[in-house]
Amino acid sequence: MKRKSGFIILFIICAAAGFYLFNSAPKQSTGTGGVTFSHYVHTKQHNIKCKTCHQNVETEERAGIPTIETCSLCHSEIINPNSAEEKKITEYVTNNKPLLWLNYYTVPDYVYFSHRRHVKIGKLDCALCHGDMTEQKSKELNNYKPILMATCFDCHKQRNITTDCGNCHH
Ligand code: HEC
Ligand code: HEC
Ligand code: HEC
Ligand code: HEC
Ligand code: HEC
């Protein structure tokens, strides 16, 4: 009982903090850069798998946003000499310059979420939570789907997965 009320008080505090943190998305990640990244070109036109770039998506909590090392797997040489955008990324790779991406999808620290659990064990499709990323043509995610507690809750209820508070909160 004592533990439970402590938990609820902690929530109220975290909730206020979390509200501001969560609603200030997108956040910036590492480096600097001005390359336009297209999911459409990579995943739809060239059939590259999500986990080629989001390398931890089946093994860890965070999927991971790729760094310049990942791009260098394919862009150390020009693939299509007519593409100005591709020329830019090849220059970044050659000079090993870091890239700057925005991080739209985050949950507050008091929420526990694991990609491995949902993608590898639960076998859920990325699109259920992120929409159809294969249509994204720029790094501004125009199909960004906010991650709300209600979204987590609804799916868990539908699929008979526990909705105990302590399951997602710690
Ligand atoms: C060739 C590398 C590459 C592949 C393949 C790739 N991505 Fe990405 N992804 C990126 C990069 C770079 C970013 C950051 C820039 C951006 O948001 O466009 C990103 C960002 C994202 C984000 C937004 C993350 C955030 O918090 O802002 C999601 C969601 C995502 N990818 C899902 C997918 C899915 C689903 C697939 C497969 C259908 C996929 N990606 C395939 C490179 C890739
Ligand atoms: C598995 C191989 C692979 C990886 C990894 C990869 N790319 Fe590509 N990329 C391609 C291919 C194939 C094309 C298409 C070439 C063409 O026809 O222009 C391409 C094209 C591009 C273009 C030009 C097309 C456009 O959008 O106009 C950019 C920019 C680009 N990639 C950025 C990146 C970045 C940034 C990363 C790292 C986050 C990355 N790529 C990782 C294979 C890859
Ligand atoms: C059940 C919902 C769900 C599914 C399915 C899902 N994601 Fe996510 N994704 C999230 C949530 C929630 C976050 C925020 C996680 C955090 O802040 O720890 C996120 C964040 C991300 C990010 C940004 C930062 C990071 O490192 O985690 C990327 C990239 C991403 N997801 C890619 C993918 C890819 C690729 C797939 C499919 C292979 C996928 N996700 C499947 C819910 C999901
Ligand atoms: C589209 C459906 C869906 C959504 C959305 C979803 N989940 Fe899940 N979740 C599942 C499934 C299915 C499992 C069970 C995976 C397995 O173990 O087979 C699961 C399992 C879990 C578990 C482990 C449960 C246990 O038994 O210990 C946690 C924690 C969890 N989810 C948190 C979250 C959080 C936090 C969110 C929102 C950010 C979320 N989930 C959104 C479908 C979903
Ligand atoms: C399936 C996962 C899941 C379960 C179960 C869950 N939550 Fe949440 N909760 C979340 C996520 C994700 C967020 C952050 C996103 C948001 O604010 O909607 C959140 C946010 C919150 C917040 C902050 C809300 C705000 O507006 O800032 C409170 C308070 C909260 N949860 C309380 C609870 C309580 C109490 C329970 C048990 C009845 C519970 N949660 C069960 C996933 C879950």
Image: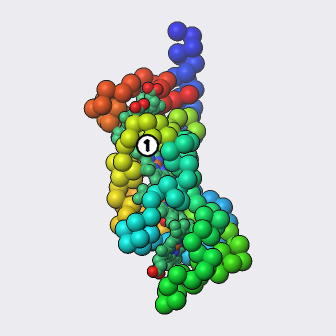
| Left or right: where 140 falls relative to 60 | left
Residue furthest to the top in view is 1
**Residue 102: image x %, image y %?**
55, 62
Rendered position, 2 above or below 30: above
Residue 71 picture quarter: bottom right
Q: Is residue 96 above or below residue 166?
A: below
Answer with left or right where residue 129 lies relative to residue 166. left
Specify whether residue 107 is in view. no
- The residue depicted at 51 percent of the width and 48 percent of the height is 57
Residue beneath the point at 52% across and 59% down: 52
Ligand 3 within 8 Å of the CB at mark 1:
yes
Nearer to us in this view, 122 or 19: 122
Q: Residue at x 46, y 57 (%)?
A: 50
Which of the two residues, 22 or 40, is positioned nearer the viewer here? 40
Q: Where is residue 30 drawn, in percent x and y?
A: 66, 61
Residue occupied by mark 1 = 119
Q: Which quadrant contains ligand 4?
A: top left
Q: Residue at x 37, y 68 (%)?
A: 44
